[in-house]
Amino acid sequence: MKAKYIPVILWALCILLATNNYNFQSLLFAQEIGFNIRLLPNLSDLLITSDIHLDSGTYVFQKIGHALSFGVLFLILAKTINNNALAIILCSLFAFFTEFLQLFFERSGRLSDVLIDIGGIYLAYRLSVYVKAQGGVSPAFWNTVQKIAGVFADEKQR
């Protein structure tokens, strides 16, 4: 195995740990790691949408974490293999795999979460395209700051 794949593998393992731990809040706040195995899960649980609670801060925080973690995975993988299209496909397949796997760990694997993960992958892809078009991270950052400052300057003149 080439050493360049180590960051990708480590990040993917972090995602697997976070998504399959028996209790996300225990992992986050008490750093407790544990797994409960279910050998015969109900695969139709992937289709449940009744547990979407956009009014819950914890729920929204978890979903932002989904998008960010898969976005970071895309950025690391795309840089490693130098192929955005393949990185999008592999990260999207990994997103589905993690949700499917959750069913075997008494977690709630959902296709809606796969869509959130893919949304994070897409946003990271768009960010990488923007950064590349600007000539790198530093120019992209300063160009964006200037645009934002320009908007505020326009507001003050009104």
Image (cartoon, rainbow, N blue to C red):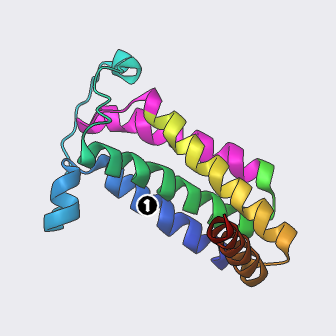
Residue at x 32% of width, y 31% of height: 103
Residue 42 lies, with reference to residue 157, above or below; the image says: above
Q: Quadrant of the N terminus?
A: bottom right
Determine which quarter of the picture holds residue 44: top left
Q: Which amino acid does label 1 sit on?
A: Leu
Residue 35 in the figure: left or right of residue 80: left
Residue 39 in the figure: left or right of residue 118: left
Determine which quarter of the picture holds residue 37: top left
Residue 154 position in % (x across, y down) = 70, 67
Residue at x 33% of width, y 52% of height: 61
Camera-nearest residue between 69 and 1: 69
Residue at x 73% of width, y 84% of height: 138
Magenta stretch, overall SS: helix
Q: In which quarter of the image is the C terminus?
A: bottom right
For disc 1, the neighbor class at 10 Å (few under 14, some 14 to 19, many from 20) is few
Residue 1 in the figure: left or right of residue 57: right
Q: Is residue 43 one of those drawn in magenta?
A: no
Residue at x 49% of width, y 57% of height: 68
The residue at which mark 1 appears reads as: 13
Residue 58 position in % (x across, y down) = 25, 48
Determine which quarter of the picture holds residue 132: bottom right
Residue 129 in the figure: left or right of residue 50: right
Camera-nearest residue between 121 and 103: 121
Looking at the rendered structure, the secondary structure element under dot 1 is helix
Report if residue 62 is visible in the image.
Answer: yes
Q: Residue furthest top?
A: 44
Camera-nearest residue between 73 and 140: 140
Camera-nearest residue between 30 and 11: 30
Q: What is the span of residues highlighted in magenta in the rendered image?
A: 86-112
